[in-house]
Amino acid sequence: MGKILIASRWYKPEKNPRAFRTYELVEELLKRGNIITTFLPEDAQVASRVNNMTVPHGEMKKSVLRRKKSSFGGLRSAFVYFIGEGPTMVRYAFCLYKMIRKHLLVHNDYDVIISISYPFYVNVALAFIKKFTSQSTVLIADCGDPLYKNPNFKKAFYLKYFEKWVLNQFDYVTIPIEAARNNYLEYLPPEKIKVIPQGFKLMDIPDSAYRKNAVPTFGYAGVFYESIRNPRFFFEYLLTLKQDFCFVVYAIADAFTAGLLAEYKEKLGDKLEIREAVDREVLIPEMATWDFVINFDNDNSNQRPSKLIDYAMSKRPILSFNQATFKSEVFAAFMQGDYNGQEHIDLSQYDIRTVVDKFEKLFYQK
């Protein structure tokens, strides 16, 4: 049993990979008898067993069905280029830094402190409080995405050196997949980089949940990115099909995603069904009723969507591709019920119990 502090920008009820990462980690560590203190946003739904400190945050976009243009888009892009994150995220990290620093001046007996990013500035906040921690405390930065090498946004060159300084304040940097290691090797010695996959409490979906649909029904859940996960090519392909189908999209609220879906909803009509993001406990049984699921691979090979884990739990065939790897003949075969080209996922490595076992090994290696 240990005393652990965890800081994150995301938590339940938010529905994104970092929220899932934080929530599942907290819940499993609690089950193992650890004493947990969290620093989380105001809207986090935290168990009463957790000593939670609420951190103020700015208003975020909530609906993928309402497209809203911002007059501050250019200003925000400039801020991201020079600073590395948007102003809302930087403000959150500054509040986080002040609160944790004040907390550690009184409670400085933690065995482990874990910082979970994105945003990267959560790591920045924790890096600056290192001098307030005990020398025996293990500091872990859990990085879902790199800062400088994330191709989703252009950034100033000096952020590369800033990222290196921040990460070197931690004892370990954990990453979700082996392919991401190259993003960090020029910043850190190899022994400080640890691969710990995304972890979930696995769901057992009965085979009887699926019945063949009257028209081919397939779906996607997640978010799109203009630069690394842009599905426009696929929507254009769907427009060429003469047969009936139903493409269901559960989308996380995001300006690019909302705009893209609105455009193709108008063109595809009832063939495209757009739904708000829902809890995994609702989503996975729903996906189990589809004929197959679509995974849009990122255009860069060092990041993979964590939604693949949910897809695998649904027990439906997974068709993975991006613009470079899409093959119309394989998709046509899936539409006919031929799933020879499906991707197979080993779920055992994503069991939250296995994932926390890997974290716990780091707790005692300083």
Image (cartoon, grey):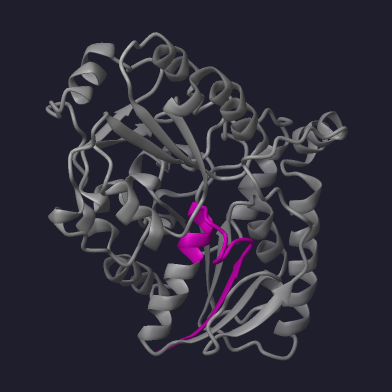
Up the image or down, 14 lies above or below 114; here it is above
Residue at left offset 76%, top offset 62%: 57
Query: How many numbered callouts?
Result: 0
Q: Nearer the viewer, residue 235 or 273?
A: 273
Which of the 4 image quarters holds residue 364? bottom left
Can residue 36 be seen here? The reply is: yes
Up the image or down, 131 lies above or below 209; here it is below
Up the image or down, 9 lies above or below 335; here it is below
Can residue 172 be seen here? The reply is: no
Residue 31: x and y in percent read 37, 85
Which of the 4 image quarters holds residue 243? top left
Residue 304: x and y in percent read 39, 39
Residue at left offset 22%, top offset 54%: 347
Residue at left offset 49%, top offset 20%: 268
Q: Which residues are magenta?
A: 1-22
Q: Nearer the viewer, residue 85 or 133?
A: 85
Residue 76: x and y in percent read 81, 36
Up the image or down, 4 lies above or below 122; here it is below
Query: Which of the image's four quarters has the N terminus?
Result: bottom left
Residue at left offset 32%, top offset 34%: 218
